[in-house]
Amino acid sequence: MKLLPLLAGLLLLTGCQPAQTATDNLAAAQPVVNSEISAAFISRRADPWVYKADNGYYFTASVPEFDRIELRFSPDIAGLAQAEATTVWRKKASGPMSANIWAPELHRIDGVWYLYVAAGEAERPFQIRMYVLANSAADPMQGQWQELGQMQSALDSFSLDATVFSHRGQHYMVWAQQDAARSYNSALVLAKMATPTRLEAPEVIISQPEFSWEQQGYKVNEGAAVLQRHGKIFIAYSASATDHRYAMGLLWADENADLLDPQSWHKAPEPVFQTRPEFNRYGPGHNSFVVGDNGEDLMFYHARDTQQLQGSPLTDGNRHTRWRQLTWSADGMPLFNDHLPD
């Protein structure tokens, strides 16, 4: 992986798991201008994922109870906020997939719907692994969701936040996983997919939590989201503890590069999206990208409205789904416009 200074356009930007540095100064940040400001689009839904289908948009996210997978549908983006949530799957009573149901993502591959989700076990809640469910119905909110088991990676360790993208006819998966030495909580791993339920060797690490802003509380790279534009493949990701120190980073590779060569990936050394007390935006992250009603690029993400927690970052369910429009620099880099409100 190449660590490069941000391009001129990117310089305009400011900027879930078990060490502290610069962002601890947020505790001494100036007070917010208006404590009533909230940009929540869907309350108490974290790790938002939006999928654009031919007839509209599907939404899923982590629920505060971490006990089920919900889907909602709307023909347009705005309607998702009030769309009825349908529970399509509930956690099991024991064993795999019986605790900490985190960050589901909905994908359609070769005419079949798939849900990729992280889950633990009631007996071992943080034995987090990736799992797959499938549904052959035309509407993923109908039909039966079949459990297809664990998405096996070469290393059997803490793993989560699987996302899927297709490039030149090949499906790839990016996920977050702890190394065998447990030197960090999670790094980003990339591999080709042999099938929707099986990875293909090699599995390569494309980003590790190496900068101080990625190591606040925990050493984390997670929550990858892929956007393909302007001859590049971009991967936004989230880093550090899931409190006010949570922030987003950016990787990118040329579309003609060997994606399985870690040296193909460039990494922004500073966060591209982070806490802004003046907007009551605390700990933004775990985003997804989607094309909006009018063809614009949108980013959905979660954040809290306050730095104060009710309990721990994990038990405080007040992470709310928000969204904003991306813009682009002249040289084809995404501008997250961190300095602007939603």
Image (cartoon, grey):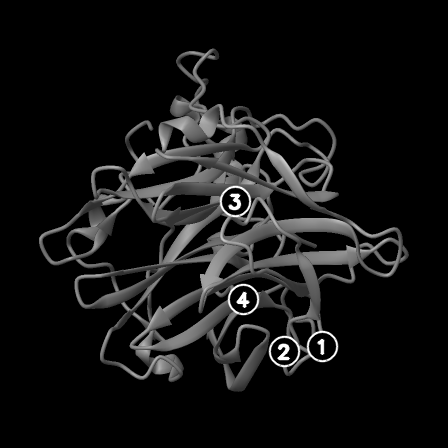
Q: Cβ–Cβ below 8 Å for labels 4 and 2?
A: yes
Q: What element carries label 3?
A: loop
- Residue that protrudes farthest toward the left in the picture: 330
| Front-lying residue, 8 or 78 | 78
Closest to the camera, between mark 2 and mark 3, is: 2
The residue type indicated by label 2 comes to Ser
Q: Is mark 4 on a helix, strand or loop?
A: strand
The answer to whether the residues at label 1 and label 2 have Cβ atoms under 8 Å apart is yes
Residue holding disc 2 = 153
Looking at this view, is 305 or 317 the one in front?
317
Q: Which of 233 and 179 is in front in this view?
A: 233
Residue 340, located in which quarter of the rendered image?
Answer: top left
Q: Is residue 201 rendered to the left or right of residue 296?
A: right
Tag in front: 3 or 4: 4
User: Crowding at label 1, few (<14), some or many (≥20) Cα neighbours within 10 Å?
Assistant: few
The tag earlier along the polypeptide, 3 or 1, is: 1
Mark 4 vs mark 2, CA separation in Å:
10 Å
> Where is the N terminus found, in terms of image quarters?
bottom left
Sequence order check: which comes first, mark 3 or mark 4?
4
Residue at 68% across, 32% down: 316
Q: Name the residue under label 1.
A: 156
| Residue 134 seen by the camera | yes
Q: Where is residue 252 in the image (x, y as percent from the top left)?
A: 30, 66
Q: Point out residue 232 in the picture as x, y percentages from the top left corner.
A: 23, 67
Disc 4 marks a residue whose amino acid type is Trp
Where is residue 322 drawn, in percent x and y?
Answer: 43, 32
Of label 4 and label 1, which has the lower sequence position? 1
Up the image or down, 304 lies above or below 237; here it is above
Which residue shows up at 24% across the image and 51% down it? Answer: 334
Q: Quadrant of residue 78?
A: top left
Q: Mark 3 points at which residue?
A: 246
Given the image, on which type of amino acid does mark 1 rest?
Asp
